[in-house]
Amino acid sequence: MKKPILSIAVPSFNAEAYLDKCLYSMANPEFIGNLEVIIINDGSTDGTLEIAKKYIELYPDIFILIEQENGGHGSGIMTGIANAAGTYFRILDADDWVATEALCSHMENLKDCDSDLAMSPFTLVDMLSEKESIKPIPKGIKLHTKLRVDDTPELFHYYDIHCLAAKTELLRKLNISLPLKTFYEYSEFVFKTVAGAETVTCFPENVYQYMVGNVSQSMDARKMVERYNQHDLILRRMIEVYIHISDNKKPLGQERVRRLALKQLIIGLIYDDNRKRGRARAKETMEQLSKSCLEVAKSLRKKYVILKGLNRLGVKVGLWEKMKSVYQRMV
């Protein structure tokens, strides 16, 4: 069989409400030979398996099913990498989907790409209002051009699961290990992947359609408070990676750790209704950064002071969402 240019892993746990839309967006005869979709049924107990089987029957040359005991998102990613046949590999959450025509064009571009990483814009789609917001490739980045990762600081904040494809060969070489049954492992996966890559090429196709506003999502404020220890675990693991990466990748590491650490401060000081606990957690985060990532700690100090003040004033999620832009200008 012809080797596909792209493998897309779809880790799926109890995803019957969304999976059909996700898989339908890739059920296109034009993709045969170029695309491989690996559906990982991660111990689902609903109708996820039946939906997956439907698409395998319709397009056996595109869709592949792997069943496993529930291991969480990280387990699904590692299973996808281990079984991927495509030159490039990317992840698609079961509650998201792709823009079919954009994916078709993107795969044509990937055929001529030799970079470790391939980047593309993505769209955030509000679950309730269906309002769309495009996240374009940062200005100043040349498209269709092979660039060095450490020479493109404009991309350091942009790398995300929703815009990233990586060479399958590179991912296997890196032997990325992720914690089981833990959320936010995508941050660790992206960091380890980019830190291990040398080159990147950006393309214009807006492929990934990312649904936001679902209260069951891991990025919902209440869920983040509930899963604080998981978020903290991923931050600690990323700090450990940062400590050992090469000097030329340190700026990248600082940006990725800073981004996750700032989110952790917000979880503790704004999202958590237990104000005292939140302050204690935020203080612990800053102490940890001061010991292992002093540069990140320094860059967050002013933000930390302001967030702590907002915490003492009783600012919660609703008001925070309204005043975020003001806060960003302050820091």
Image (cartoon, helix red, strand yellow):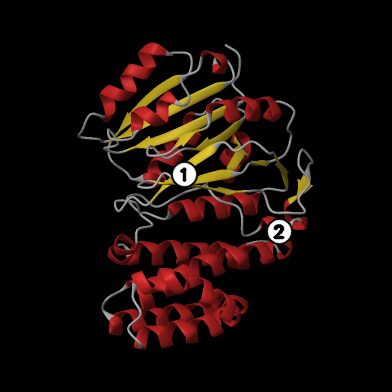
- Circle 2: element type: helix
Q: Is residue 329 left or right of residue 216?
A: right
Q: Position of residue 219 (x, y in %)?
A: 38, 57
Quarter of the picture holding the N terminus = top right
Taking 265 as reference, is 196 above or below it? above
Q: Give the quarter of the figure containing the C terminus.
A: bottom right
Whole-percent x and y of residue 325? 52, 71
Q: Residue furthest left?
A: 45
Q: Amino acid at mark 2?
A: Glu
* Residue 54 visible within the image: yes
Mark nearest the camera among 1 and 2 is 1
Measured as percent of width and height from the top left, residue 225 is found at: 31, 67
**Image vertical order of residue 18 relative to residue 296, above or below:** above
Residue count near mark 2 (Cα–Cα under 10 Å), binned few <14, some 14–19, many ≥20: some
Q: Nearer the viewer, residue 169 or 279?
A: 279
Report the disc number at residue 28.
none
Q: Is residue 175 visible?
A: no
Give the quadrant of residue 283: bottom left
Amino acid under label 1? Tyr
Disc count in the image?
A: 2
**CB atoms of marks 1 and 2 within 8 Å:** no
Image quadrant of residue 111? Answer: top right
* Residue indicated by mark 2: 154
Residue in the image at 53% along x and 32% along y: 99
Please indicate whether residue 213 sits to the left or right of residue 132 in the image: left
Is 49 rendered above or below residue 226? above
166 and 205: which one is in front?
205
Residue 210 circle label: 1
Q: Secondary structure at mark 1?
A: strand
Q: Nearer the viewer, residue 326 or 32?
A: 326
